[in-house]
Image: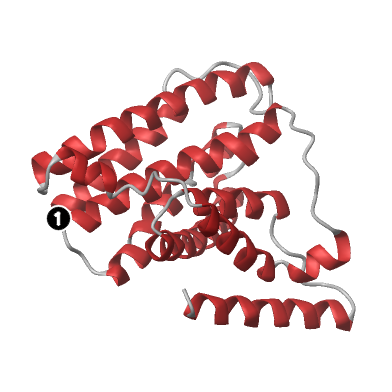
Amino acid sequence: MVVRLLSSAFATFYWIGIYIKPKEGLRDDPAVIKNTMVRIVTSTTVAIALGPFAAQTLIGGDYWQNFNLMGLQMSPKGVAIALGLTMTLFSGPIIRNGIPRPEWSWPDLRDYLFGPLTEELVYRSVIISFYKQAGLSQTRMIWETPLYFGLAHMHHALRKYRQGVPLRECIIPAIAQLAMTTLFGAYASKLFLSLGSVWPIVAAHVFCNLMGPPDIDGPWWYRTLLIGGLSTFAYGLTKL
């Protein structure tokens, strides 16, 4: 119970960083993005600094032991493994359309850099470190911790509702996004536990955001690539 409350508190703290005193304007307005990025980078930095202390106080271990559980050390080999495995899942779209090239506008920086980086540092590094220190099972770390990550993305539905979109038109996309982000969170948690570093997960998250959901329509050879890529991906997961 303590671990869940602590994880919920830090997940909420990150979410509040998005919405507390938001700058007026459209979501893709550069001024709005800059303002939001400052707040979430600040909340992420605070979470990394205070997470080990909170774990020490409420769960156990000393500060640096808990800090080391967050997997902040670099792992070039892990990045290569995570990217290689993730790319197999997108083998069909990559062969058909190539890898998209971002323009690195402010919306791109938010979606492909700041978002994945800060989310993984909080929802993987900090929260999973709580579960590790408490000695909870890998099954719980893989399938329970992504729920914090998935629920955090419900703010997109809230934003649409606040913009006047009818509630019924917000619910179904919100449920679909919850399922998709939770599944990705389970994959990211598995990678984190297997590779021991958060940076491979950041790389995988950036790549997934860049590619977007794969299109399942196409000629027979494209669908064959999708099935083959999914099979290779599933096999690779079992070898981590």
Q: Is residue 229 left or right of residue 127?
A: right
Res 19 seen here: no
Position of residue 69 relative to residue 240, above or below, is above
| Residue 101 in picture, x, y percent from top left | 80, 44
Depth check: 77 or 237 in front? 77
Q: Residue at (32%, 28%) from the top-left corner? A: 46
Q: Is residue 4 left or right of residue 36?
A: left
Position of residue 217 relative to residue 208, above or below, is below
Q: Which image quadrant: the N terminus? A: bottom left
Assess disc 1: are there few (<14), some (14-19) or many (≥20) residues with their C-alpha within 10 Å of its C-alpha.
few
Depth check: 31 or 69 in front? 69
User: How many discs appear?
Assistant: 1
Q: Quadrant of residue 195?
A: bottom left
Res 171 seen here: yes
* Kind of residue at badge 1: Met
Q: Quadrant of residue 63?
A: top left
| Residue 228 in picture, x, y percent from top left | 72, 82
Q: Residue at (38%, 57%) from the top-left corner? A: 196
Q: Residue at (11%, 49%) from the top-left corner? A: 59
Q: Residue at (30%, 39%) from the top-left corner? A: 10
Depth check: 21 or 1 in front? 1
| Mark 1, residue position | 1
| Residue 86 in picture, x, y percent from top left | 62, 64
Q: Quadrant of residue 73?
A: top left
Q: Is residue 199 left or right of residue 135?
A: right
Name the element at disc 1.
loop
| Residue 215 in picture, x, y percent from top left | 77, 66
Furthest toward the right, the residue is 219
